Image (tube, grey):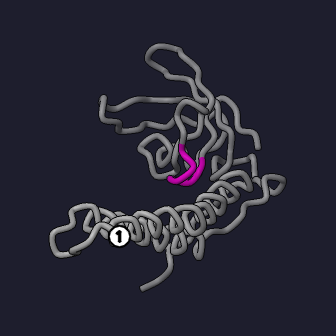
Amino acid sequence: MSKKISYYTKEGLDRLTAELSELKSKGRAEIARQIAEARDKGDLSENAEYDAAKDAQGHLEAKIAQLEDLLSGARLLDENNIDTSRVSILSKVTIKNKKNGASVTYTLVSEEEADLKAGKISTMSPIGKGLLGKKKGEMATIKTPAGEMEFEITNITA
């Protein structure tokens, strides 16, 4: 099985690393405390608190493993080396909706960094996929859940 490579900004990679560190230290310590507390209450065969704590431990370890796997395939993107002649990951692209004339600017990022409120959309989203590789002035016809939409790429920056 080949490792999935994902590209991140420094901010996104730092956030994932901090989350992993937090789960490994404080998360594991909290689960250990809960298990010890439940053990002190006696018979483990009928101890719902113990079962719940062990279940929470399993979920925590799964999340840690998922983050470690994600980080092992993570690559840091240098924002200074972004080609602005075409839309690519980390491009800041301004698009104009041909139907209503509304313009919006998005930064294309990895799935894990996507945050619509911050203007960051995933390269795997319908709009992100439809914009990748396009040049300024080109039209992009994109199939969205709301139907087919047509956008003009009006600007690309890093």
Could you tell me which quadrant the C terminus lies in?
A: top right
- Between 142 and 22, which is closer to the camera in this rendering? 22
Highlighted range, magenta: 109-114
Q: Say whether residue 38 is left or right of residue 61.
A: left
Tell me which residue sits at (55%, 30%) in the image.
Answer: 117
Q: Residue furthest top?
A: 100
* Residue at horizontal 58 percent and vertical 62 percent from the top: 26
How far across and down, in percent of the image, does residue 120 sit? 59, 39
Q: Nearer the viewer, residue 49 or 135?
A: 49
Is residue 138 positioned above or below 73 on the image? above
Say few, some or many: other residues with alpha carbon within 10 Å of mark 1 (under 14 / 14 to 19 / 20 or more).
Answer: few
The number of discs equals 1
Q: Is residue 58 above or below residue 158?
A: below
List the single residue furthest toward the right.
80
Q: Residue at x 41, y 63 (%)?
A: 34
- The three-letter code of the residue at mark 1 reads Asp
- Asked if residue 112 lies in the magenta stretch, the reply is yes
Q: Is 4 inside the magenta-drawn segment?
A: no
Residue plotted at (64% across, 43% down):
135
Residue carrying label 1: 40
Classify 5 as above or below 13. below
Q: Quadrant of residue 10?
A: bottom right
Q: Position of residue 40 (x, y in %)?
A: 35, 70
Q: Nearer the viewer, residue 115 or 14?
A: 14
Write down the quadrant of residue 147 in the picture: top left
Q: In the picture, which quadrant includes the N terminus? A: bottom left
Above or below, comparing residue 146 to residue 29 in the picture: above
Dot 1: what SS? loop
In the image, taking residue 59 as reference, residue 2 lies left or right, namely right
Pick whichever, 44 or 13, lies toward us: 44
